[in-house]
Amino acid sequence: MILRRSVILALGSMPLLTRGVFSQTAVRARRVGLLSAAAPFQTDIMITNAYAAARVIKDRSNVPVVAITGADPVATGLIDSLARPGGKITGIGEVAVELSAKRLEVLKDTFPGLRKIAMLWNANDLGMTGRYKNAEAAARTLGFEIQPLGVREPEDFAAAFAAMVRDRPDAILMVTDALTGLNRKRVFEFAAEHKLPAIYEYDFLVRDGGLMSYGPDMSEVYDRAAELADRILRGARPANLPFEQPTRFRLIINKKTLETLGLTIPAAILMRADEVVE
């Protein structure tokens, strides 16, 4: 339990991207690596919270990896298959095709009059581009018109916003990675100024001011990633540990943001929400 708790603590620090967490057992010290902007460590295992980070370690290191990723790990070449990852990487990740469709269905149920959806994503990231393509295919199946807005650096957001001013969408879907996440406040502010509903992928974005999200329960994701890391530290090979997928998903709505936007939504949607942020 001490070993597993040390892994969970390391995962809990990941959204902050500020520090590594270490713990000792009575038998031997274990080091859990956290990929961040800080100085690198010599480690027994690495836990990554992004496709790009996992890709770097796969290409440049022999350290075992537990990857938490929203990118398709097979399509992006991280692993051979979900059942038998091969190599040194396993982990847990979203079912992007199904989740993209579900997010858009939630958006359509909440705002039935939607026709055009702007999709904002990091066009420099292979994993996020794959997520965008999944969302685009799902949107077209549901009858939506798509406004693609790929960004590659912070300066590109102004052009994306200007494009939405010239050709107004009915809603926004933001694909989340480090680039879009770090610029989330700009997206929130633009959506508020132009009274645009937006759906996000993770609940922390709603607690931070976004309107609504539908995505995996991250407490489950981190717990299962910790269990995988624990098994590897006890001798299991990542190649033989199936790449897992979340089983619990949550709909979160920010009521204050809803009121700021001056929008109303069906009572049934509020009742469906797993959490309403006041």
Image (cartoon, rainbow, N blue to C red):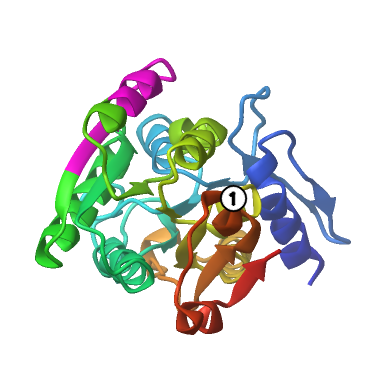
Within 10 Å of disc 1 (Cα), the crowding (few <14, some 14-19, many 20+) is few
The picture places residue 4, in percent across and down from the top left corner, at 72, 66
Verify whether residue 150 appears in magenta: yes
Identify the image quadrant of residue 218. Answer: bottom right
Verify whether residue 213 appears in magenta: no
Residue at the image position 67 percent from the left and 22 percent from the top: 39
Check disc 1 and give the amino acid type.
Thr
Outermost residue on the top side: it is 155
Looking at the image, which is closer to me, 36 or 268? 268
Residue at the image position 18 percent from the left and 62 percent from the top: 138
219 over 76 or under it: above or below: below
Residue 26 lies left or right of residue 250; in this view the side is right
**Residue matched to label 1:** 260
Looking at the image, which is closer to me, 53 or 274? 274
User: Magenta region: which residues?
Assistant: 147-162
Identify the image quadrant of residue 59. Answer: top left
Identify the image quadrant of residue 230. Answer: bottom right
62 over 171 or under it: above or below: above
